[in-house]
Structures are given as C-alpha cells and as structure tokens.
Image (cartoon, rainbow, N blue to C red):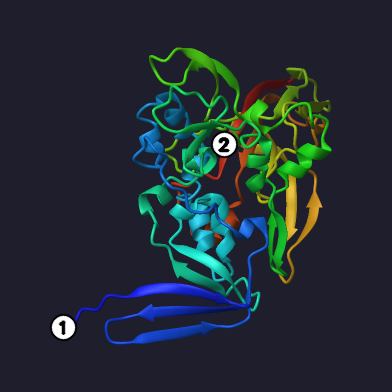
C-alpha cells in the first residue's frame, strides 16, 4: 500500500481562500469564494501561544507543581470543567451548534482542533477551517486553565511582574482586570432566529449599584495573604476557585459556592386553633451579588417550595414560587419573562393554610438553585450523575392544631 505525506497551506486573495494540499503525486487546489472575515470578538480564539521561557507546558497541572494552592482551588472551579461539562458537550453535538461556542470554553487556539479562517458567504455554519498543527488535546481537557488568563506573547502575565519567577513574567494588572472576565461572561447576541446567546452578567453589573466600586474579582477572587510558591514568602494573592452557583458538573466533583441571597424566615406560631390560618413568609434578598440573581445561563432558576404535611405524611398544602427567566426557543428565540432579583432587591414569598383538622403538622421550606429543568436534562440526554440543583435553604417547622 502506497503511503503519501501531505502539507496543507492556506492563501488569501481578496476574499478567496485557496487550500493547497500537496501530495507526492499531485496538487489539489480547493477554492472557497466569498470568504467573510471574522469580526465578532466571540468568533475568534486567543491566538496561538508559545510556552514561555522557563516552562515546558501551558497546562494547569504543570503550573500546579509550584503554584499548588492555586491549582487545587482551580480544580474546584467550573472553569476547570468548562470543556468536559456534559451539558456543553450535548449542546455541541446538535446541528444548530455553531463553531464559535467553544471560544469561551477552550479560549486558547492551542486547545482547538481547527483554526477558523473566516466564513464562507458569511454563514456561521460554513466556517473555513484549517487543521491546527499545534492542537493539544490534553490542554483542551483543562477548559479554562491558568494559561487562558495568564499567558500572552511568550510571557506569564501577573499582578507584580516579579523577577523571582523561573519563567518570563510581565506585570499587567489592567489586562487581569474584570474586562477579562466580561469577555466571556457578557456574550449577548442573536446568532440565528432560533439561537440566542444571553449571558448578561457584565451588563447587569455595569447597570447596578456597585459599578466602579466593586468588580468581579472583589467577590469571585477574594484577596488573601499567602505564599504564591511555598518557600518564597507571603504576599497579596487571590483565591482561584471562582465560586459561583455551587452546582457541580458531576456528582463526584466538589464545586465552590458563592451564595448571593440573604434568606430571612418569619417567626412561625407553633400552636393553632381549629379554623386559624397558618401564616409563614420568607424574605429573599439579592444581598451579596453585584449582578442579577440568578445570572448567566438563562435556563438557571431558583425554586422556593412550601410543603405542609400531617402526621401520616399526607400533603395538606403545597406552594412553589420561582425566580428566573422564561424563554421561548421556537420558532424564534425570545425572552418571555424575567423576574431575576436585581442587586439589593428583596421579595417576600408567603404561605398560608386554613387549619381544618386537629393534629401535629410539619411545614417543610426549601430553596434550591437549579441549573435547568428535568425536561431540558432529558432532551440533552443527561444522566443521573449530572446534578441539576443544589439546596441552599432547608428548614422543617413543627406545628400543632388543637
């Protein structure tokens, strides 16, 4: 059997891309006309990054050999599972999934199998692709890793630019500001009539009360004095677990949580007479977040559930309230409603029940953070090992009707 070697090169001429595949026996030229250049920031990966002098890899695991605390914290973050997330992988398999979605989940060109040179006829479903000769599949699995934010132009970008590091380091705190976070956490676009990207956390923060006072880093990368590398002495640093919803990507994974809600239950009378009304309320306030809660993925929501049961375990009354957005995706993607809590906004959820029978009762009150509903999980064929929610409030109140 004859073995051939081929080299693929790409030439640009006034909106025409020529793919020239040179084999030992022949030259094949494929002409792609009417090529539209990429203009949106989310269409373009971070260009190929060389490994800085003094390092042997761009992997987070390699960084963790010295920066052990940072690496262990990063492993608790959803950033570390941005590529391997089962929901994201399910979305990628859909025919409606365009090429640019991966640019927030694996930002470095080094992590991507193909280099996108443009769009044929401006069609997002016809990207002009070139095989990436520097594709690193192991680096891809790390999702948003250390190099995603800290490596550019052959150097490690840090807040101090220390000369003690064994690798080339430059100081650029402006680059490492909240604008780096917002590159991905504020992706808002209607890609096609049935495909909308609606991640508005940056806009919510800019419209909120903490703009120019506190930013993403203040809350999601808390300051701490510690050794950056063991044996080098303490200095100001930031935690790198990037706490957020706290809903893990797998049931075997631990994720750091930052709860934006303040939850304040009312005082509940424990004794009632027949024909009294059992009254209970829960005040929920977006007390700790500088953006809406929930934020990010429009499928996220909170459920506030009241459930009153008798001694036999029979449900006498139940009530469910929801905080979140409602979207219609077909035939056109559009937001139907949005009751997300604004920063410092509070809302009272009430439960009442007419006590008609004597006996001992229990009132169960729970609040859950939800990634998506069961219907969406079934549609994406997500198994039982993919957590859909976590419980952030769970109280049981004993009541007696005499």
User: x, y percentage for residue 283?
Assistant: 78, 27
Q: Residue at x 39, y 38 (%)?
A: 53
CB within 8 Å, label 2 to label 1:
no
User: x, y percentage for residue 15?
Assistant: 62, 77
Please say if 38 is above or below 285.
below
Give the spatial CA distance, label 2 vs label 1: 58 Å
Residue 352 seen: no
User: x, y percentage for residue 32?
Assistant: 54, 82
- Residue projecting furthest to the top: 233
Q: Residue at x 65, y 46 (%)?
A: 183
Nearer-N-terminus badge (2/1)? 1
Q: Which residue is drawn at 37% across and 34% down?
A: 54
Q: Nearer the viewer, residue 357 or 64?
A: 64
Q: Which of 1 and 323 is in front in this view?
A: 1
Question: Which labelled disc corresponds to residue 390?
Answer: 2
User: x, y percentage for residue 194?
Assistant: 69, 68
């Amino acid at each position: 059997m004859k073995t051939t070697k081929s080299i693929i090169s790409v030439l640009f001429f006034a909106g025409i891309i020529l793919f020239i595949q040179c084999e030992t026996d022949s030259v094949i030229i494929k002409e792609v006309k009417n090529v539209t250049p990429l203009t949106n920031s989310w269409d373009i990966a971070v260009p190929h990054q060389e490994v800085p002098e003094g390092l042997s890899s761009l992997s987070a695991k390699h960084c963790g050999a010295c920066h052990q605390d940072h690496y262990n914290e990063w492993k608790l973050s959803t950033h570390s599972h941005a590529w391997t997330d089962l929901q994201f992988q399910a979305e990628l398999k859909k025919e409606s999934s365009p090429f640019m979605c991966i640019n927030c989940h694996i930002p470095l060109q080094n992590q991507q199998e193909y280099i996108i040179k443009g769009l044929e006829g401006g069609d997002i479903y016809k990207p002009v692709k070139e095989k990436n000769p520097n594709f690193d599949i192991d680096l891809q699995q790390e999702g948003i890793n250390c190099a995603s934010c800290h490596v550019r132009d052959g150097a490690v970008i840090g807040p101090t630019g220390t000369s003690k590091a064994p690798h080339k380091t430059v100081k650029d705190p402006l680059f490492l500001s909240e604008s780096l976070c917002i590159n991905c956490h504020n992706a808002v676009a209607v890609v096609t009539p049935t495909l909308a990207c609606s991640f508005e956390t940056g806009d919510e923060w800019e419209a909120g009360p903490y703009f120019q006072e506190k930013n993403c880093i203040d809350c999601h990368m808390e300051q701490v004095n510690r050794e950056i590398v063991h044996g080098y002495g303490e200095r100001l640093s930031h935690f790198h677990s990037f706490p957020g919803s706290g809903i893990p990507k797998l049931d075997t994974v631990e994720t750091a949580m930052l709860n934006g809600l303040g939850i304040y239950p009312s005082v509940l009378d424990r004794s009632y007479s027949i024909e009294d009304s059992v009254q209970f309320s829960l005040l929920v306030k977006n007390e700790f977040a500088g953006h809406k809660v929930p934020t990010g993925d429009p499928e996220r929501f909170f459920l506030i559930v009241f459930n009153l049961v008798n001694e036999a375990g029979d449900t006498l009354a139940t009530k469910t309230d929801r905080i979140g957005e409602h979207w219609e995706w077909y035939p056109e993607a559009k937001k139907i409603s949005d009751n997300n809590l604004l920063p410092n906004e509070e809302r009272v959820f009430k439960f009442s029940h007419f006590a008609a029978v004597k006996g001992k009762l229990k009132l169960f009150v729970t609040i859950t953070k939800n990634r998506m509903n069961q219907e969406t999980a079934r549609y994406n064929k997500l198994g039982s090992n993919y957590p859909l929610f976590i419980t952030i409030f769970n109280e049981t109140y004993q009541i007696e009707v005499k």
